[in-house]
Every structure is written in structure tokens, then in C-alpha cells.
Image (cartoon, rainbow, N blue to C red):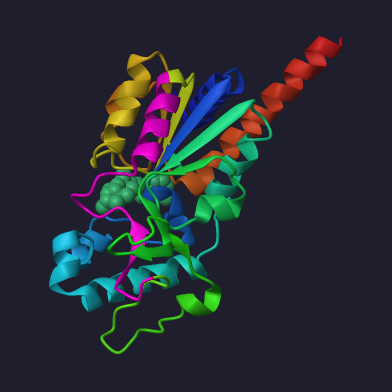
Amino acid sequence: MNSSERIRQAAILIERCRRLVVLTGAGVSRESGVPTFREKGEGLWSQYDPMQVASITGFLADPVASWRWHEHLRDLCRQAQPNPGHVALAQLERLLPQVVLVTQNIDDLHQRAGSTDVVPIHGTLMRNRCFFDCLGDPTYLTEEEMEPGFPDDGVPRCLFCGRWARPDVVWFGEMLPPELIDRAVGECRQADVLLVVGTSGIVQPAASLPYLAKEFGAHLIDVNPNRSGITAIADVWLEGPSGEILPQVVEAVRLLREEKISSHAE
Ligand code: APR
């Protein structure tokens, strides 16, 4: 089956579904200039040790180094713009009764592209919270507060208690916020279609969501230029960059919808 036939096959599954769940990983942001984690040679984890920069133990060992890494990635994400793949996913909300977008990404690009029901299961880099969870509430920083106004020891402070702040992201070895993962699991159990975009399908518990969705009867579509941990169980594999593939899928869904409307009108 050639790629346009696969696009049409995916569009037919999406157009007729009532509950679409999307699961994205770093690949969907790659065409915005945000690096992935495991891309051969250029992924973030080929340049940095995740246990040093993105874990509790790493932060405690050297909070300044961890903050430098997060600030670098935060600057990259803030300068990045949503790409056509992010925009296409947001457009799907106008074509379908329900679209829930579960993302492993912490770059806020889905929200900036206009997606309105986003479940950021790994948190967001655009917000700090108290390392000691003094209020339990993440503190949204204003633009100027986001500037690297590092206090003397190089570690940003909690705006409420004055002790260390940390980015409001999930680090390796940490539990995901229960309300977010519970929502993601609940939506995948009810999904008619799970559209998986740009994830290697390696990191748990996100990597289990496609298997769960399939077990509860969902059709799986995998958008990825490479085979991932999901491809083997996907009904349709759309092989290519999501920034090119997703706009084609959305256009095909739109045309199918128009055909349906005009056939009803006759
Ligand atoms: N379009 C779609 N997918 C792409 C593109 C693209 N243009 N370019 C690369 N990819 C795919 C790669 O083939 C790979 O399968 O994106 C995937 C990125 O995989 P990872 O780098 O492992 O990122 P991700 O799956 O999001 O990692 C999950 O691991 O380190 C943790 O918390 C981090 O959320 C992250 C989690």
C-alpha cells in the first residue's frame, strides 16, 4: 500500500471516530527545532546524562548544572514555533466531536498551536514549582521572572517560601501526576482511535498506553519516520515526518467529511 493509500486509510478511521486520543512524543516537535531525546547522534541523551540533569539525585548532586540544562532547553522551547504537525492536530478539534491530546512533551507547543484539551503527563518546562512543594501549587512564572535571574548560588528560588525552585516536569524515577496519568488511561480505554505521533514508545508508563487502547478496541495509527515500539501493533504506520504527514491526514479527513455532507445533501 503506498503512502497516499495509507493516509486515506488513516483518515477513514479518524473521520468516523467519536473519541480520538492523540499520544505525542518529542518527534512531533523536531521540525520546530526542539531536539528529540534518542535520535541517533543528535538526541539530548547522546549529549547529556539524563540521570545527572533530569533526576532527583542528579539535581541534589548539582542543582546548578541541572538548572543550566533546563534553562537551555526552556530557551530552545520558548524560541521554537509550533510546526504544521502541531497545527494539524489542533485543527482536528474542529473536525471531530472529541480530541484529547496526551503528550509526553514539556515544550507547550501543542497548547501554543491551539490544542485545547492537552494532558501533559510529563509536566511543563514553562513553569517552576517549589522543590519542597511548600504550597503544592506550581508557580507560573512571568516572562521576566523566567529570565535567568539566578540568585547567588545559581539556583532559582520558590516565589513563596524562598527555598529552591525546580522546573515543573517529571524527572526520571518520579511518579507522574496521578490526575494526569489517570486521565490519560481513562481516555485511552474509551478511544475509538489512538493516533501516536513521534514517540519511540520506550518510556513507561506512556509506552503502555497504545497497548491499553488496543486492548480496549481502539484502532492504532503510528506517525513516525522510523519504526517505533508501537509500529508492530499499529493498524496503520504513516512513515514520515509528522510536520508533512499530519497536514495530509487532516486534509483527507476534511475531504471525507465534505463528501459525506454533499452525499447527504443529494
Ligand atoms: N516526526 C515524527 N516523529 C519523528 C520525527 C518527525 N519529524 N523525527 C523523529 N521522530 C521520532 C523518532 O523516530 C523517535 O521514534 O520521534 C521519536 C522520538 O523518540 P524519543 O527521542 O525517545 O522521544 P520520546 O519518545 O518522546 O521520549 C519519551 O523519554 O526521556 C524521556 O521524558 C522524556 O518525554 C520523554 C520520554
- Is residue 188 toward the left or the right of residue 263 in the image? left
Q: Position of residue 151 (x, y in %)?
A: 34, 86
**Residue 171 in which image quadrant:** bottom left
Quarter of the image where the C terminus is located: top right
Relative to 91, 47 lies left or right: left
Asked whether residue 188 is drawn in magenta, I would say yes
Q: Residue at x 64, y 25 (%)?
A: 97
Say which quarter of the image contains residue 234: top left
Picture layout, residue 109 above or below residue 214: below
161 or 131: nearer the viewer: 161
The residue closer to the viewer here, 103 or 255, is 103
User: Is residue 42 placed above or below 146 in the rendered structure?
Assistant: above
162 inside magenta stretch: yes
The residue under the point 44% across, 39% down is: 102
Residue 55 visible in the current orientation: yes
Residue occupying the far right of the picture: 266
Looking at the picture, how far across and down is residue 90, in whole percent? 60, 43
Image vertical order of residue 39 relative to residue 62, above or below: above
Which image quadrant is residue 216 in? Answer: top left
Residue at horizontal 41%, vertical 84%? Answer: 149
Is there any visible trace of residue 228 in the rendered image? no
Compare residues 230 and 19 and report the one nearer the observer. 19
Label tally: 0
Residue in the image at 40% along x and 33% along y: 184
Residue 160, position as x, y percentages in the image:
41, 70
Residue range corresponding to the magenta coloring: 161-189
Relative placement, left or right, of 192 versus 98 is: left
In the rendered view of the protein, which quadrant contains the N terminus?
Answer: top left
Q: Position of residue 226 (x, y in %)?
A: 32, 41
